[in-house]
Image: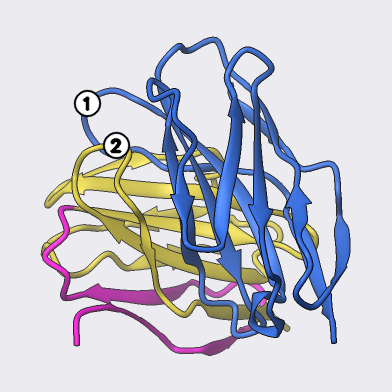
Chain colours: A blue, B yellow
Amino acid sequence: AQTVTQSQPEMSVQEAETVTLSCTYDTSESDYYLFWYKQPPSRQMILVIRQEAYKQQNATENRFSVNFQKAAKSFSLKISDSQLGDAAMYFCAYQDSGGGADGLTFGKGTHLIIQP
Amino acid sequence: DGGITQSPKYLFRKEGQNVTLSCEQNLNHDAMYWYRQDPGQGLRLIYYSQIVNDFQKGDIAEGYSVSREKKESFPLTVTSAQKNPTAFYLCASSMGTRGNEQFFGPGTRLTVL
């Protein structure tokens, strides 16, 4: 079974600075999808960014970017110019490729604190 | 507005009782999912459904049951066989194939008294 590990239970960053959240995963598959979801205090899960394993180019969404290292099975999230609204739990998630729907395998999350 | 609704927001249950959590979506998504979230834990998959009248067990299906009679609805029943049901339950939906974004509802907090 696939596993996802987030080794940083909590991270703190000053507003306007850059922070990187770590994620590693274990799989024997060569094709899969990786996601970062954000869960603010409202507990509403929101997709931050998505990466397809067969694409070598790192995904970017505005201030959010990933560093995808397939050989190392690493998928870190970089948040640039941190804002107070970025404060949340961040979850890394994995999904096998293949036909049909399937659930996501989540890490335990990193609690991100933004210091004003 | 398209989205996913879950009801109720808070639910209290006595030990030994079954309880049903509602999940409705108007996104016209084929696939729907139920996840459980415990403090300090990530989300864990309970059940998912690719299409009406079809559903599959996830990693922690014991003590839970689901139905998918309509595309829009995917209710979850927490039975008395679930030994530790107190948790936060999240419903999600997506287009039918893998790799697509899963859209989440606001969740239901279930507490067993």
Image side of residue A1 versus residue A100, left or right: right
Q: Nearer the viewer, residue B96 or A87?
A: A87
Residue at image mark 1: A99
Question: Is B27 part of what is drawn in magenta?
Answer: yes
Which corner quadrant of the image does residue A76 belong to? Answer: top right
Q: Residue at x 69, y 73 (%)?
A: A88
Q: Residue at x 56, y 89 (%)?
A: B10
User: Does A56 appear above or below A71?
Assistant: below
Q: Nearer the viewer, residue B14 or A109?
A: A109
Q: Residue at x 19, y 44 (%)?
A: B96
Residue at image mark 2: B98
Q: Residue at x 15, y 53 (%)?
A: B30
Chain letter of mark 2 equals: B
Question: Is A65 part of what is drawn in magenta?
Answer: no
Q: Secondary structure at mark 1?
A: loop
- The image position of residue B57, as x and y in percent, is 40, 39
Q: Which residues are magenta?
A: B1-30
- The image position of residue A94, as x and y in percent, is 52, 36
Image side of residue B42 versus residue A12, left or right: left
Q: Secondary structure at mark 2?
A: loop
User: Does A42 appear above or below B86?
Assistant: below
Dot 2 alpha-carbon crowd within 10 angstroms: few under 14, some 14 to 19, many 20 or more = many
Chain letter of mark 1 equals: A
